[in-house]
Amino acid sequence: RPGILMANTPTSLPVTFIRNLSLDPAQHPRGQAHLSAASGLVRVRQRLYVVADDELHLGVFEEHAASGTAGADPAAGTLVRLLDGELPRDKGKRKKAKPDLETLAQLPPLPGCPSGALLALGSGSKPQRETGVLVGLDVQGVPHGRIASLDLGPLYAPLRKRFDDLNIEGAFVLSGDLLLLHRGNKGDASSACIRYDWNLIAPWLAGLQPKPPGAKSVQLMVLGDVDGVPLSLTDGTALQGGAWAFSAVAENTDDSYLDGACVGSAIGIVAPDGQLRHLHRLAGAPKVEGIAAQLVGTGLGSDWVFTLVTDPDDPHIPAQLLQTHVPGRLVTPAA
């Protein structure tokens, strides 16, 4: 029987704006000068990879690029195509047609990808949103051209029996498992952490097994609410020693398809035993849908720096790159 995690009283964290996720409009299929719906984030060395739920491309950004004031923007990212075709310009038609890539994970080496890979996953919230993309990386952590499409239907089918409104929004590898994060909503406030044995699922991801393995465990997560709107998982990232962190938002919507106002957001820390250790509300309630973590410093003076990306739910508004800090002692207490 899965455990249910209950949130503790949250404390507020200040959030620093770093920059907008700008692009060269000549690169963008609809001429936008930015990504507008950032939904998953992975850091590989000093490079940030971002999936957006209304695009067919992967955004690639240099983490420490400085914004320019004239001419070409040196902070502008580039796009790597993940799926063929073009999405409609009309927002409503695009919403119906998009593969809804909500999740991006960095994978360790697996068959065919000896230096690891990036894995983008459709949310599964509609039948057309059951496509995944595997992108091989070279030894420098750069996509090397090997891109494979995955049918996620066999993976998601058992989950649909468990969750009436399936919405996969996060994934990462931790302690020999691949974790998928299901996002709840006002219709069903329970989010969930779903674990798969990495050694069993890696051959399926690589196309060497016809069927994916069953889930190793499913743990429900109830994160509390903001003004009556439940906080729900939007992404996750591995920390040290089996701990992990997540981003969550309180979006005022009853299902996984319709957008709603974001009334609150938070970062949570989950201990290696699966218990929620800390929940920190984010100042200003940015709609954070991607998170990456980096430990800075040593010993008692260390901090976890969380890099975040946002989805403003408006194609005319750029997604933002944000940062916040959590003291290392709150993640890994002294022995």
Image (spheres, rainbow, N blue to C red):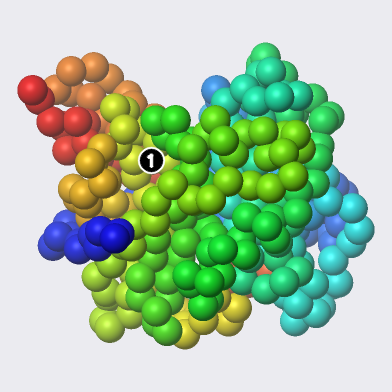
Give the image location of residue 96, x and y in percent: 76, 77
Mark 1 surroundings: few (<14), some (14-19) or many (≥20) residues within 10 A: many
Out of 88 and 162, give the one closest to the viewer: 162
Q: Quadrant of residue 116?
A: top right
Percent from the top left, x then y, of residue 299?
18, 18
In the rendered image, which residue does mark 1 sit on? 306
Depth check: 204 or 86 in front?
Answer: 204
Question: Outermost residue, right direction?
Answer: 85
The residue lying at 49 percent from left, 44 percent from top is 196
Q: Is residue 18 above or below residue 64?
A: below
Looking at the rendered image, the quarter that the C terminus falls into is top left
How many callouts does the rendering have? Answer: 1
- In the rendered image, which quarter contains the N terminus? bottom left
Residue 242 in percent (x, y) is at 31, 33
User: Residue 3 sits in which quadrant?
Assistant: bottom left
Q: Nearer the viewer, residue 112 or 289?
A: 112
* Res. 240 visible in picture: yes
Residue 101 visible (yes or no): no
Residue drawn at (89%, 53%), measured in percent from left and top?
Answer: 84
Res 92 quadrant in image? bottom right
Q: Residue at x 89, y 61 (%)?
A: 86
Looking at the picture, how far across and down is residue 46, in whole percent?
A: 56, 25
- Looking at numbered disc 1 in the image, what kind of residue is underneath it? Phe
Q: Determine the residue positioned at 32% across, 24% down.
A: 296
77, above or below 224, in the image: above
Helix, strand or loop for disc 1: strand
